[in-house]
Amino acid sequence: MGLRINDTIPNLTVETDEGTFALHDWIGDSWAILFSHPKDFTPVCTTEFGAVAQLADEWEKRGTKVLGISIDGVEEHKKWKTDIEATSGAKAGFPIVADEGLELAKAFDMLPAEAYMPDGRTPADSATVRVVFIVGPDKQLKLSMTYPMNVGRNFAEVLRALDGLQTAARENVATPANWTVGQDVVVPMGVSDEDAIAKYGSIDTKLPYLRMAKLPE
């Protein structure tokens, strides 16, 4: 059984190009994004790592740490970062897990328990290891996205989803389709009209079960 929303993530001790640590200790009181890759020095993954590096200020604003994962070793990760930084124009200032033994990939159900990497492996041997996990300060999984090999991840959407998760947790609301910061939110069904009006000043009732409100600034 794979990780489900609100499951506590495994507290693995991982080796990275920036040292060894337990995942729960590394997350601390922050939000965290773990994004995984099937192999270093691959084209799509290089652009993705560059996109994450370019968003460093945005992650910091949101109190969020980012952690790359790839099944190659520490020295390969260090060399790969040179390419990432050269192509993106941004410093890759986040650690990358060296998941050579597939411990993390298997614990997070990205690969089956019996999986192994053959000699001369290619990205196709670990193609399923292309997932984004967003984890809360409570160490629980809040969101996951899985992508195929040939479609690059949209990290603007990851950032938007993170904003939605943080807003929902902070304000006890939900967010509608395509929501971005500053737009109206959904009033939870368990909140009465009277309580919602008291909190937000007014509500826009689209349907009896769909009520929108603007968050106080």
Image (cartoon, rainbow, N blue to C red):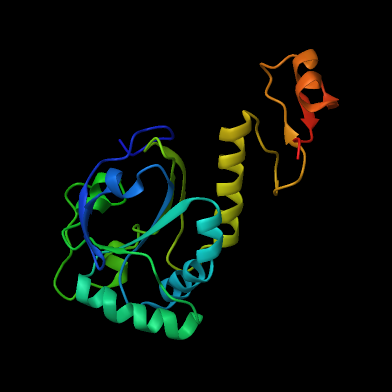
Q: Quadrant of the N terminus?
A: top left
86 or 63: which is nearer to us? 63
Query: What is the total number of numbered labels drawn onto the structure image?
Result: 0
Q: Position of residue 183 (x, y in %)?
A: 76, 44
- 177 lies above or below 68: above
In-image side of 198 versus 115 (left or right):
right
Q: Compared with residue 69, is residue 104 higher up or lower down, i.e. above or below?
A: above
Q: Residue at x 15, y 67 (%)?
A: 118
In which quarter of the view is residue 168 placed? Answer: top right
The residue closer to the viewer here, 114 or 175, is 175
Farthest bottom residue in view = 86
Q: Quadrant of residue 198?
A: top right
Kindly identify the residue that appears in the image at 61 percent across and 39 percent down: 167
From this view, report whether residue 96 is shown above or below residue 105. Answer: below
Residue 59: image x %, image y %?
A: 51, 58
How far across and how far down the image is residue 89, in percent? 50, 82
**Position of the C terminus by quadrant:** top right
Horizontally, is 170 left or right of 100 in the view? right
Quarter occupied by residue 29: top left
How far across and how far down the image is residue 192, in percent? 74, 14
Q: Residue, x 84% and y 26% (percent of image)?
A: 203
Q: Nearer the viewer, residue 141 or 170?
A: 170
